[in-house]
Image (cartoon, rainbow, N blue to C red):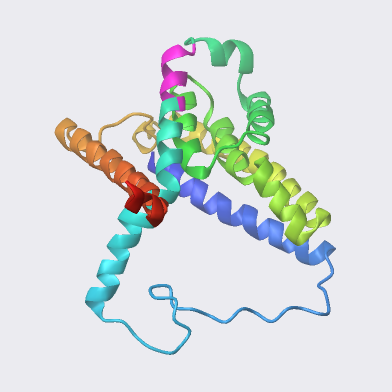
C-alpha cells in the first residue's frame, strides 16, 4: 500500500540520519584521512572531462535497468517470491495470532528472526507482504523489512572490518531502536486511519493492473532475469574451452 511505502522511505531516512549523528558524537574522526578516489564517468568509466549525447544516456539507462539491475536483484526477487508464496500457502491462518501475537512482542520476534537472516531488501518485500496477509501487524512487518536486509551477517562483517567495532555497535543500535520505535509508530498510524475509515490507503491486496497485463509483464520480467543470468554465465566460459569444442 502507498501508506506503508511512503512511511518506509521516510523512516529509513530518519534511521540513517540517527546512525550518522550517533557516529559523529561517539566516534573520533581520524586525523590522517585518505584522499577521496578520483571520480569516473558512470557510463564509460573515463576519468577525463567529457559529455554524452541524450540518446546515449537513454540507452545507458535501459541497459542498466534491464541488465545490471536485474542481474543484481533478479535472483533475490525470485527467491523472496518463492518464500513468500510458501508462507502464504503452508502457514496456518491462526499461526501469527497464536504464536506471535501483536504489538511489541511481534516486533521483537521479527527482530530476532530478521537480524541473523541473510535476506536482501528485494527478497524481504514479498516475505513481509505474505506475513501481513497472514495477520502480522504492520509494525512487525516494518521491523523485518528494516532489520532483515540491514543486519545480515555479511553486512555486519563488512561494517566491522572497514569502519570498526564501535561503528558496528552504533549501526546495530540505530537499526534496532529505529526499527522498533518507528514500527510502533506505524501501528499507531494504521490504527488511526482504520478508526476514521480510511482503509483504502493501506490495501494488502488490490490489483493495480488487469490480469492480462500483470501476467504478461511478470513473464517478461522473469524472461529478462533469466536472459541476464545466462548471458553472464556464457561470458564466464573460457574462450579456449569454446574453441576445443
The question of residue 145 being in magenta is answered with: no
Q: Quadrant of the N terminus?
A: top left
Residue 203 image offset from top left, x and y in percent: 36, 32
The image shows residue 238 at horizontal and vertical percentages of 42, 53
Q: Can residue 208 be spotted in the picture?
A: no
Residue at the spot x=54%, y=27% of the render?
A: 137
Image mark count: 0
Describe residue 121's horizontal placement relative to residue 114 as left or right.
left
Q: Residue at x 58, y 35 (%)?
A: 144
Image quarter of residue 115 = top right
Q: Does residue 104 appear anywhere in the picture?
A: yes
Above-or-below relation of 206 to 67: above
**Whole-percent x, y for residue 139 in the image:** 57, 34
Write down the quadrant of residue 53 in the picture: bottom left
Please say if 150 is above or below 83: below
Is the magenta region chiefly helix, strand or loop?
helix
Of the pair 245 and 38, the residue shown nearer to us: 245
Which residue range is magenta in the image?
83-91
Asked whether 62 or 204 is in front, the reply is 62
Residue at 38% across, 51% down: 232
Q: Residue furthest bottom?
A: 49
Amino acid at each position: 500500500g502507498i501508506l506503508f511505502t511512503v512511511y518506509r522511505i521516510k523512516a529509513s531516512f530518519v534511521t540513517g540520519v540517527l546512525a550518522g549523528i550517533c557516529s559523529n558524537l561517539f566516534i573520533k574522526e581520524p586525523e590522517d584521512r585518505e584522499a577521496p578516489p578520483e571520480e569516473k564517468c558512470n557510463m564509460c568509466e573515463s576519468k577525463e572531462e567529457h559529455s554524452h549525447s541524450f540518446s546515449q544516456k537513454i540507452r545507458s539507462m535501459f541497459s542498466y535497468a534491464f541488465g545490471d539491475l536485474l542481474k543484481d536483484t533478479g535472483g533475490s526477487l525470485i527467491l523472496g517470491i518463492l518464500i513468500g508464496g510458501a508462507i502464504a500457502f503452508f502457514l496456518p491462518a491462526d499461526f501469527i495470532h497464536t504464536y506471535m501475537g501483536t504489538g511489541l512482542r511481534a516486533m521483537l520476534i521479527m527482530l530476532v528472526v530478521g537480524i541473523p537472516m541473510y535476506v536482501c531488501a528485494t527478497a524481504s518485500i514479498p516475505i513481509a507482504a505474505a506475513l501481513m496477509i497472514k495477520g502480522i501487524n504492520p509494525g512487525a512487518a516494518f521491523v523485518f523489512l528494516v532489520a532483515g536486509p540491514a543486519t545480515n551477517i555479511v553486512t555486519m562483517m563488512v561494517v566491522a572490518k572497514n569502519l570498526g567495532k564501535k561503528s558496528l555497535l552504533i549501526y546495530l543500535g540505530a537499526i534496532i531502536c529505529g526499527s522498533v520505535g518507528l514500527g510502533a509508530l506505524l501501528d499507531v498510524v494504521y490504527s488511526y486511519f482504520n478508526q476514521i475509515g480510511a482503509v483504502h490507503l493501506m490495501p494488502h491486496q488490490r490489483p493495480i493492473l488487469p490480469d492480462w497485463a500483470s501476467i504478461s509483464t511478470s513473464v517478461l520480467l522473469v524472461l529478462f532475469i533469466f536472459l541476464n543470468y545466462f548471458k553472464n554465465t556464457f561470458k564466464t566460459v573460457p574462450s579456449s574451452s569454446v574453441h576445443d569444442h
